Image (cartoon, rainbow, N blue to C red):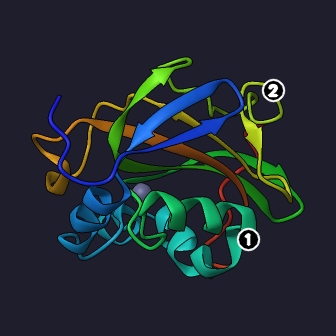
Amino acid sequence: MCFDGVMQVVELRKWSVRCEPDLTREAYALMDSGSAEACGCEECFNFAATRHLVYTPKVLELLEWLGIDPLLEAEARHDACLGGGRHGYTVCFYLVGEIASGPATPVARAGARTAASLESAGEGSAVGFCTGDDPPEAFKGLPVVCLEVALTVPWVSNAPEPELTG
Ligand SMILES: [Zn+2]
């Protein structure tokens, strides 16, 4: 594997991830919108409207450190209706690097968000890494790791809230 920038290692719970924040920043500079804008469904519209509210300082600090632009997620998936106007989402960001040790499969799923598999990042959010299988075009040809962020998001859209699915 050929890296040009300054290699960093992030240790997070069960993961050790080699990453290239400078190359990651360059890739984000090539992107112009997050997946929530590109999709257009109500769940994504709601996420785009609340995006500036939902990341904890701890998550924002991690994204900044990794070279990730918090506005440019690769995927924002609505996982569950939690009741009381709250919704569980999993948001994926790619970064340039590789998982040196730790699990490579996605772990942030509905029902698993309270599991010990993710590192808590405060206020009901949690983060973890996986290999990811659908990086944005800006990352094509680069070694990538996917950062999963499990979030609790309020429903602010004027559209009807999705039904409780448990
Ligand atoms: Zn959508």
Label 1 C-beta lies within 8 Å of the nearest ligand 1 atom: no
In the rendered image, which residue does mark 2 sit on? 115
Relative to 130, 85 lies left or right: right
Image-based side of 135 in relation to 166, left or right: left
Q: Residue 134 carries which label?
A: none
Residue 8 point in image, percent of width and height: 44, 46
Residue 156: % across, % down? 68, 79
Q: In which quarter of the image is ligand 1?
A: bottom left
Image height check: is 118 above or below 151?
above
| Front residue of this view, candidates 125 and 46 | 125
The amino acid sitting under disc 2 is Ala
Question: In which quadrant will I find the N terminus?
Answer: top left
Q: Residue at image x 63%, y 32%?
A: 109
Q: Mark 1 points at which residue?
A: 57
Closer to the observer: label 2 or label 1? 1
Dots 2, 1 in contact, CB < 8 A: no
Residue at 57% over, 72% down: 46
Q: Which of 165 and 105 is in front in this view?
A: 105
Relative side of 135 to 107, left or right: left
Query: Which class describes the residues within 10 Å of circle 2: few (<14), some (14-19), or many (20+)?
Result: few
| Label 1 CA crowd tier, 10 Å (few <14, some 14–19, many 20+) | few
Residue 148: percent from the left, percent from the top? 54, 43
Q: Upstream in the sequence, badge 2 or badge 1? A: 1
Q: What residue type is labelled 1?
A: Pro
Work out whether residue 155 can be spotted: no
